Image (cartoon, grey):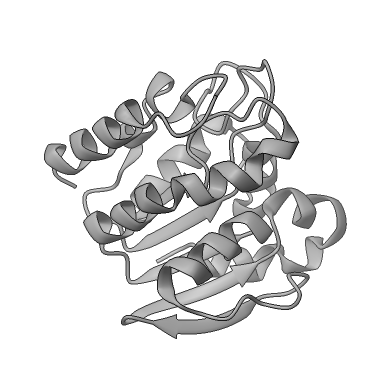
Amino acid sequence: MSSKTMERMERLIASCKRCVVVDKPFLKYEAYSWLPQKTKILAVGESPPPGEKNSVFYNLNLFDRLRLSMKLILDIDKDLEVLKKLKKSSVFFTAAVKCRPVNQKKIQVMRVNCLPILREEIRLLKPKKIVAMGKTASTSITEILGLNQPKRLDRIIEAEAKNIKIFFTPHPNYIFRFKRNLTKKIKNLIEC
């Protein structure tokens, strides 16, 4: 990962004014400092938790449900170890919506507004594999790569586009609550 890539992504997010947002957690908590040297796998989640909160995947000072779910999937006990493991495995965990929504209802509009940023992120990082986790992430990835939206997201669905292997999965929080039988399969998908 070049510092130019990190700077480019941070500038894109900082300059975006398309939505009314609570904050920009990818900047506030320096998400792009966790970019691996070479991103082989881009894991795409949905959005930072909506509302007046500070919890987010990259804020290690507060509890975060997504990070808890990823600890289960990766079979790791410590929050910091999740981020270290992903980076060591050449995985970057991003979101279809980069900024914190005011409320849940705003996520769909923000998702559409965030498509150019996610598209540029894919172009810059050049992953060999994308794991779209949840409906919001899957919708954005299908629109960017010209694929059909999976009808169901209660299992893993595989596709390919533009020489990138794509995997559509349930959201990690759904896996934590309802589909723990998928944890090993998801772990295998996001480890190189």
Residue 139, given in percent of the width and then of the height, sits at 59, 64
Q: Quadrant of residue 56?
A: top right
The answer to whether one can see residue 40 in this image is yes
Image point (52%, 51%), residue name: 112
| Rendered-image quadrant of the C terminus | bottom left
Image point (71%, 29%), residue name: 103
Residue 97 vs residue 32, the one in the foreground: 97
Location of residue 46 with respect to 77 vertically, above or below: below
Image point (19%, 43%), residue name: 5
Q: Quadrant of residue 144?
A: bottom left
Residue 171, given in percent of the width and then of the height, sits at 69, 55
Residue 27 vs residue 33, the one in the foreground: 27
Location of residue 139 with respect to 108 vertically, above or below: below
Residue 25 lies left or right of residue 78; in this view the side is: left
Disc count in the image? 0
Location of residue 1 with respect to 191 vertically, above or below: above
Image point (73%, 68%), residue name: 182
Location of residue 179 with respect to 45 vertically, above or below: below
The answer to whether one can see residue 95 in this image is no
Residue 26 lies left or right of residue 11; in this view the side is: right
